Image (cartoon, grey):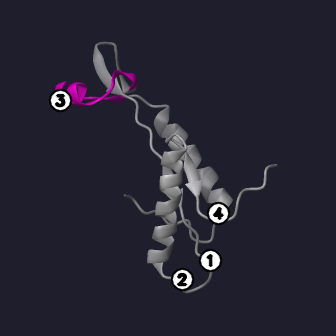
Amino acid sequence: MAVKSFEGMPMQDAAVLMDRFRRSVASKKFILRRHEKFRRQNSKKDRGEEDGHPFINITFSAGLGCRDFPGEDSRDIIEQADKALYKAKENGRNCVFYYGPPRKEQ
């Protein structure tokens, strides 16, 4: 698990930024050096071959937590982010969720 701080940034802006990063990672092909073990352990839909080089597509989900009031314990924020991450995984993975009030559609 990685923890990133978007201190001072509104939650929806942080979610947009994280989603942009998620889409950027998902759009890349990562070449595998030691691919035989990987081929046995992973599904065919996440890998391929291009110009004779094996590659994998990587996706991830992210959960974001928010400091609701000054002095809030960082463990509470991490717990919020963890809950949001599980929501992202329950909703098909490869997405970003944040803990907090529902988004208003624009």
Residue type highlighted by circle 3: Lys
In this view of the protein, which residue sits in the foreground, 5 or 85?
A: 85
Residue type highlighted by circle 1: Asp
Using the numbered discs, state the Cα–Cα distance from disc 1 to disc 3 in whole angstroms: 45 Å
Q: Mark 3 points at which residue?
A: 37
Q: Mark 1 points at which residue?
A: 68
Residue type highlighted by circle 4: Met
In this view of the protein, which residue sits in the foreground, 1 or 89?
A: 89
Q: Mark 4 points at which residue?
A: 11
Q: Residue at x 29, y 29 (%)?
A: 42
Q: Position of residue 60 (x, y in %)?
A: 45, 44
Which residue in the rendered view is the most extreme toward the bottom? 71
* Labels 1 and 3: the sequence-earlier one: 3
* Labels 1 and 4: the sequence-earlier one: 4
Tag of residue 72 = 2
Q: Position of residue 65 (x, y in %)?
A: 55, 66
Residue type highlighted by circle 2: Glu
Q: Residue at x 51, y 43 (%)?
A: 22
The reply to whether the magenta stretch includes residue 56 is: no
Q: Position of residue 81 (x, y in %)?
A: 50, 63
Using the numbered discs, state the Cα–Cα distance from disc 2 to disc 3 in whole angstroms: 44 Å
Q: Give the range drawn in magenta.
A: 30-45
* Labels 4 and 3: the sequence-earlier one: 4
Is the residue marked by circle 3 packed among few (<14), some (14-19), or many (20+) residues within 10 Å? Answer: few
Q: Do the residues labelled 4 and 3 touch (CB within 8 Å)?
A: no
Which residue in the rendered view is the most extreme toward the right? 106
User: SS at mark 3?
Assistant: helix
Q: Which residue is drawn at 53% across and 49% down?
A: 88
Using the numbered discs, state the Cα–Cα distance from disc 4 to disc 3 in whole angstroms: 40 Å
Q: Residue 99's image quarter?
A: bottom right
Using the numbered discs, state the Cα–Cα distance from disc 1 to disc 4 in whole angstroms: 11 Å
User: SS at mark 2?
Assistant: loop
